[in-house]
Image (cartoon, coloured by chain):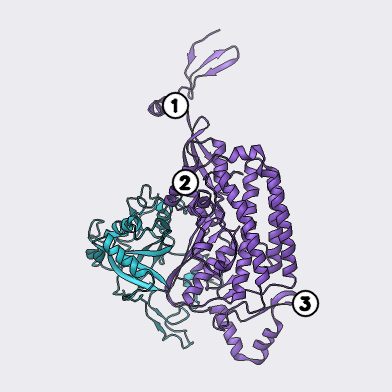
Amino acid sequence: MGGPVERPVAEDSAPEQSAADIQKVAPTPDSTIDRQTDEPYGSVGTERRGMFGVSGTGDTSGFGGLLREPWTPPEAERPYGGYFDEIVDALYEAYPDAGAAITKVVVDRGELTLHIDRDHLIGVATALRDDPNLRFELCSSVSGVDYLGARHRLHSVAHLTSMTYRRRVRLETAVSAEDPHVPSLTKLYPTADWQERETYDMFGIVYDGHPALTRILMPDDWDGFPQRKDYPLGGIPVQYKGATIPPPDERRAYK
Amino acid sequence: MTHTTTEDAYAPYRHTTEGPVYNLTGGDWESALADFGQAPQDRLVMNMGPQHPSTHGVLRLALELDGETVTDARVVIGYLHTGIEKNTEFRTWTQGVTFLTRADYLSPFFNETAYCLGVEKLLGIEAPSRAQLIRVLMMEINRLSSHWVWLATGGMELGALTAMTNGFRARERCLDVFELITGLRMNHAYVRPGGVSQDLPDGYDEAIRTWLKEQREELHGLDKLLTGQPIWVNRLKDVGWIGVEGCLALGLTGPLLRAAGLPWDLRKTEPYLGYETFDFEVPTDDRGDCWSRFVVRVAEMWESLKIVEQVLDRLEPGPTMVDDPKIAWPAKLSLGPDGLGNSLEHVQKIMATSMESLIHHFKLVTEGFRVPPGQVYTAVESPRGELGAHVVSDGGTRPDRVHFREPSFINLQSVAALSIGGMVADVIASVASIDPVMGGCDR
């Protein structure tokens, strides 16, 4: 079975609490990130300084002062363009709570992303699948992304395809590592079964309502979630003249 | 002659003229059997794989049998998990291709193209038309080579050994073409963000036209060998049925979906790389069984030959890499006395005349190019179905996340639906008809 989440769990992180409360969960004490981004949803990347991954003395490159801020996809404004307006309009018609469900609409590179509050994910997905104006019959892909540094760092991303209209939409649900619960889509889309198991296996996102949420690619007794950005990489402790070769994420490299 | 039972540390026994006879009705065994009284009798749980010649690589099936009938089937995967997705996060965008080509090792060009289309979408660039045509050419040849392996291994698993030898012979012809063009039979890393790594070599046209002729002969031979053959027909017809609703619920795409009757092919429905300009059909069938999948795949091979021929007619000289020195690989490969390598002209330029070129080369090769932050999902129609690449960038020189929506992974979920209620021997036919590649499934 999957190993437990090794991070300290905040007291007020019961699964049934509302998403609004979860945002108040304190940052993890062991986090090495200096600055938590204020943006709860959709920050991409962490703040980085310099270029070679070194700090303190020794960096004579002149690049040590470089600062790269985390990037947040901008909220899209009407009209979204293409069929995106039709999708959002039809969703508002089919799902009365859509205003509360959709926390952010992003249109980027010709793709529509709806950031969905997890309490409404099932309702939104049901409307997307069943409404005759939407008809997203196929759940193409479910996977996760870890935006280390954001408060809601774990994103569960579902790509839905409408074969009737030949459209695609991306549903993104962000949760924190302390309370990584997302409702499972398996009842609506049975194909999500293995994909949610893989996302749980790799990111530790717990899909509530999944029939058998066990590890699928890693061994059953594995500890930790390998695709998380703070998962220790190990490396091979090869010594040469007293120095050891560090794991790939700690090596001096272009970042 | 005594028949008294004697106590023993392991099991009670009695002496007979033939020697001691042990009575093995232990307490544990009886309680275990008592539990079984609740369930139907004569059920057997059988493990098949991961080391089994009929499971298409390291796939493990746990089958529950009632006599010869399968009453439950579970699939265990992960034996070939190599962390390809995680590895790409520690390499440059260009180096990612080298990993992803190894995921589904029977359709490397599809992996490379799906990923590169994603990176190009993030960059907001488009490969030159010649590079796009070359990608189409390689993918369609690859579709044939992949389907040949499906036929060869599937045939072998059903006892048609000639199908295997003929299939691998035909596939070897495809690999010869790959070797001619990319230098490698497998794991090419030929498609790169911005284009392809090198132009087509001299004599490619003649070689591929010869190949086309050979493939047609091989396909005719296949037709003679299998299509009317009673054993082959009986092993496949009415075996492993799944309908369109089942396909959509389980996310099955590619030949499985088309064999159930839905003409869903991303080359037609969401055209990429100019597929909308090619003249080809999307073969379908309406039986939804293993036989339909055989018919559909063979028809697809004929269609791919049509596309390859059209590409050859259309290819015109031109660049094969985007004209942007901030993205395009600086060194051009060229043939020297010691084989293929960096062009001497380029080496001379960076080593002798232009310091700036050296810096540029060094920066691009070691650091790579930056990709503006964002996320995209690009899908191509691989031989097994929708192969999607979910690519996320944080603005750096390495991917933040690369996820492959692998059709092998998704389609394997249908094993239970295809095989429960059938015979054990039909499980083999069903799994073969899914055509899973564990390298892609486990990544």
Is there a contact, CB below 8 Å, between mark 2 and mark 3?
no
> Label 2, on which residue?
B243
Residue B295 picture location, percent across and down: 60, 48
Of residue B378 and residue A94, the one placed in the foreground of this image is A94
| Mark 2 closeness class: few <14, some 14–19, many ≥20 residues within 10 Å | some
Q: Quadrant of residue B362?
A: bottom right
Q: Colour of chain B?
A: purple
* Lower sequence index among marks 1 and 3: 1
Q: Quadrant of residue B301?
A: bottom right
Q: Which chain is cyan?
A: A
Viewer can see residue B343: yes
> Label 3, on which residue?
B337
* Extreme-bottom residue of the structure: B353
Q: At 56% from the left edge and 17% from the top edge, which residue is drawn?
A: B20
The secondary structure type at the circle numbered 1 is loop
Q: Chain ID for label 1? A: B
> Label 1, on which residue?
B41
The secondary structure type at the circle numbered 3 is loop
Left or right: where does residue B164 sit relative to residue B122? right
Residue type pointed to by label 1: Gln
